[in-house]
Image: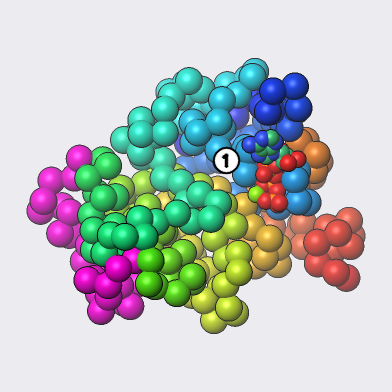
Amino acid sequence: MLEIKNLHAGYGAFEVLFGIDLKVSKGQWVSLIGTNGAGKTTLLNTIAGIHKSTKGEIWFKGTNITAFKPCEMYRLGMAYMAEGHPIFQNLSVKENLELGGIAVGLPPKQQAQKLEENYHLFPFLEQRLKQRAGTLSGGEQQLLSLARCLMTSPRLILCDEPTLGLAPFMVKELFRILKHLHQQGTTLLLVEQNVEQALLFCDEAHVLEQGVITLSGTGAELLKNAAVQNAYLGC
Ligand SMILES: Nc1ncnc2c1ncn2[C@@H]1O[C@H](COP(=O)(O)OP(=O)(O)OP(=O)(O)O)[C@@H](O)[C@H]1O
Ligand SMILES: [Mg+2]
């Protein structure tokens, strides 16, 4: 589904990613963990076309998307729940969701069907449709941001720290939804600071340190790894 070959990226003369090779197969949940400043967000931004690579290739569903723009990614089936989980604060909850559908040119009938699916997955949304999105709690805004991604019927979702700042019950709720999406066959590439949960539920995981993938394995393997336990799990 996604293949990254020898990817380099940076900011001017400051290099951040040094030859990343990464594959995410159809239906797989891949988690990416790493220290602060390792380049996780830069990697996701580069895959999503927001940041330009300096070298290397990105392939998505057999197409070389290295030079594609973010709007083209949505149409191809890639959604991005970006850092900070931006939503349109002054629009209503429903308008935010509809914009997700509009971004991929969803016809009205399918738009209505997608909204129904979202209400089923995020029951609180249906009770808040007219509420200004900016007045939702921080956690609810994060869920709305994910729900808007789902309006585009993505094959692959890139998630950058979706649980950041969430209360424990919201973290649980978010992982419930990610597990559901995975069971339904959605491919996930998740960057997460909640390392234990990220490794517990994924199929494969990678550790990114200073712009290089230093360790890869199944979630279970990384959970048992002494270096991961020391650095990320406080064991
Ligand atoms: N717009 C920018 N201009 C210059 N440097 C940047 C920019 N964005 C990020 N960086 C730098 O690139 C490096 C990687 O940042 P990035 O945000 O990708 O790390 P991260 O792994 O997502 O970190 P965190 O876990 O804190 O979110 C950092 O040293 C950061 O300061
Ligand atoms: Mg980041």
Label 1 secondary element: helix
Give the answer, above or below, for where 230 lies relative to 31: below
The residue closer to the viewer here, 217 or 145, is 145
Q: Which residues are magenta?
A: 105-133
Q: Quadrant of residue 224?
A: bottom right
The amino acid type, in three-letter code, at marker 1 is: Leu
Q: Is residue 204 above or below residue 22?
A: below
Does 111 lie within the magenta span? yes
| Dot 1 beta carbon under 8 Å from ligand 1 | yes
Give yes or no for residue 220 being in the magenta stretch: no
Pinpoint residue 106: horizontal percent, then vertical percent.
Answer: 19, 45
Residue at the (15%, 52%) spot, across then down: 110
> Whole-percent x and y of residue 145?
41, 58
Left-right relation of 214 to 128: right
Residue at far bottom of view? 169
| Position of residue 171 measured from the top left corner of the image (x, y, whole percent) | 56, 73
